[in-house]
Image: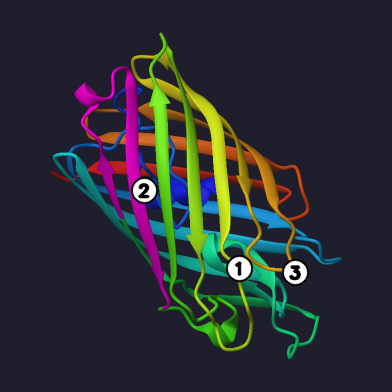
Amino acid sequence: MRRQGLLAAGVVLATAAPAAAQDINLPFPAVTFPGVSLSSGIDYSSGRYGDPTSTDILVGLTSLSVSEGDFQFTASMPYLNITGPAYVVVGPNGVPVLINPQKSGGATVRSGWGDLNLGATYSLPSDTLGDFDVAVTARTKVATADASKGLSTGATDFAFSVDVSRQIGIAAPFVTFSYRVPGSPSFYSFNDAPSFSAGTTLELDTSLIAILSYDFDGSISPSLADAQQLFASVSWLLTDEISLTAYAEDGLSSGAPKQGTGLLISWKVH
């Protein structure tokens, strides 16, 4: 789910170069301020995920990003509010999965802190790659949330990704390949799964950048179909230290949220 990556990475606008984003999900081209950046945002999504009843998820997230040379480190922890069937549990990458047969199917409202997300990205020296920019990212989601509320599976997950992009005029086409290794909770079995994104950034102005992409997330659960969605965002550099990003997505399959939207503000701390 690209929006989760957007929130967690502390993405801010500076130029149209590539970098990696995090939640556990999805790196994409954008730029973070060098040094330390703090991001805060809100995200809303709604979908049935193959179930007759809709699940609405509201996420508040603050993320810390530290850049040093070719490395970037991120940490974030979401606050979740979930309205939907009690058997829907937030799984790896923030994707809901239908995995708790012991609970009734009635709608519930659950809220609380989610899992801690940590990430590290290494950007390969561009002078060795010609006109291409390549970044390699490793992420982990540490099981810190209350699994009894369905805010987590209670297992620690891992993900690895590679981003490749190339600047062509005002556009920077990119592809992202990821592989997720979910943990093994005692009450359910998950499968490893790939994901990929393809799209482009567009430098509309010196302080305005758009991102358009198609995203595919392979399902990690037999109860959930593969997720396919379209993603779009616009980022404004308000000052040298502050950027604002608005984004939306449209689900193309039953495994993706039917709709999602969010807003992110990022500050350069140092």
At label 2, the amino acid type is Ala
Residue 155 lies left or right of residue 10; in this view the side is: right
Tell me the residue that label 1 is attached to: 191
* Residue at the outermost top position: 169
Tell me the residue that label 3 is attached to: 223
Among the 4 quarters of the image, the one containing residue 18: top left
Residue 140 lies left or right of residue 114; in this view the side is: left
User: Which of the labelled discs sits on residue 9, or is there none?
Assistant: 2
Among the 4 quarters of the image, the one containing residue 196: top right
Q: Is residue 109 above or below residue 17?
A: below
* Residue at the outermost right position: 52
Could you tell me which secondary element the residue under label 3 belongs to?
loop
State yes or no: residue 140 in magenta: yes
Query: Callout 1 environment at 10 Å: few (<14), some (14 to 19), or many (20+)?
Result: some
Q: Position of residue 8 (x, y in %)?
A: 40, 53
Of callouts 1 and 3, which one flags the residue occurring earlier in the amino acid sequence?
A: 1
Query: Callout 2 environment at 10 Å: few (<14), some (14 to 19), or many (20+)?
Result: many
Q: How is the image coloured?
A: rainbow
Residue at the image point whose x is 60% and y is 53% from the top: 44
State if disc 3 and disc 1 touch (CB < 8 Å).
no
CA–CA distance between discs 2 and 3?
Answer: 29 Å
Q: Which residues are magenta?
A: 120-143
CA–CA distance between discs 1 and 2?
Answer: 25 Å
At label 1, the amino acid type is Asn
